[in-house]
Image: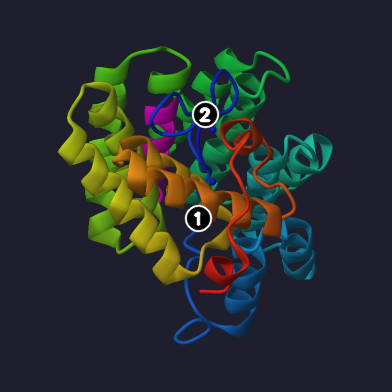
Amino acid sequence: MADTAMSGAAGTAGTTQPGEPVPALPAARSATGADALDGAVWRLRSRGCWDDAAALLEPHTAGHPRYAIRRAALLVERCLFTAAGWAAAEDALRAAEAVAGDNDERGAAACERGHLAYAATVLGVRDRADEARSALGRAAALLAPAAPGRALLDYRRGLMAEHVANSPESARAAYRRAHAGATAHGDTLLLSFTWRHLAGLALRDGELAEARHGFAESLRIREELGFLVGTAPALVALADAAPPEEAEGLRIEAARLFRLMGGVPTWLAEHLEGVPEAPAGRAAQ
């Protein structure tokens, strides 16, 4: 679930970004067509209430790998957005690893293990890059090429390539595989991440039109899904590729949402320094 990087440890797509987290299992669904628990968890998660969402899942985790892995994914995401909660995420991961029964479940747990190690590395908590590589490699060995979790794994391997190995071409190839997999499996939320990171690489290469298209698609998806906690980063990313007159408005709206979310994600703060508050009439629109 690095919802993106940050200079050094926190960046926007136009500069450097470690990349945003995506859940181990599709959670971007409304209650329509999904069970009530999934819908409730998504509503909390989309507003940055990870602890509350994890608490809803906790009674269902014993002997149920799907819920145990999903709970761990929520707490890993919390670490990346807030740079806090590491011990709780580690405990949840160990519990998920203990109940994982088949290759898909073990692969999903390994993918989360790798992402937590990646988060600790890019946020400067501790260098766990070797652990991240090992865990993601283990996930790759366990997950079949057509497994639903493979697209998420490809995305996260792209993050490692871009933000740890500094290999943009390897990252681009991994993001493209993830994009194709997310399209095939209907994982709309993951598409918002692949659009964004492919756009970031395009901007880095000076492909402004391609970058603006990708950032705009990422923002559109997040707004349509109601992924509020990921909307401010998407606005800042689009602002990096927008004309100055548009960029100012995008950053003002991003700052408004950032304040609304209580300063989450924490790494976005440095990219919104000096951005004024929206006029009262405009904020109400």
At numbered mark 1, what does the secondary structure look like: helix, strand or loop? Answer: helix
Type of the residue with mark 2: Gly
Q: Is residue 143 left or right of residue 216?
A: right
Q: In the image shown, does 123 or 247 lie closer to the viewer?
A: 247
Q: Quadrant of residue 238?
A: top left
Percent of width and height locating residue 231 = 50, 55
Residue that mark 1 sits on: 231
Query: Is 139 rendered above or below residue 41?
Result: above
Q: In the image shown, does 207 or 143 lie closer to the viewer?
A: 207
Percent of width and height locating residue 103 = 47, 45
Residue that mark 2 sits on: 11
Which numbered disc, 1 or 2, marks the residue that appears first in the sequence? Answer: 2
Percent of width and height locating residue 67 = 64, 62
Residue positioned most to the bottom = 32
Type of the residue with mark 1: Thr
The residue under the point 50% across, 81% down is 34
Q: Quadrant of residue 284?
A: bottom right
Report if residue 140 is visible in the image.
Answer: yes
Distance CA(mark 1)–CA(mark 2): 15 Å
Magenta stretch mostly in which secondary structure? helix
The residue under the point 69% across, 53% down is 259
Please tell me whether residue 50 belongs to the stretch shown in magenta.
no
Report if residue 238 is visible in the image.
Answer: no
Q: In the image shown, does 138 or 76 lie closer to the viewer?
A: 76
Q: Is residue 154 left or right of residue 270?
A: left
Percent of width and height locating residue 32 = 47, 87
The residue under the point 62% across, 67% down is 280
The residue under the point 71% across, 62% down is 63
The residue stretch that appears in magenta? 149-159
Please tell me whether residue 151 belongs to the stretch shown in magenta.
yes
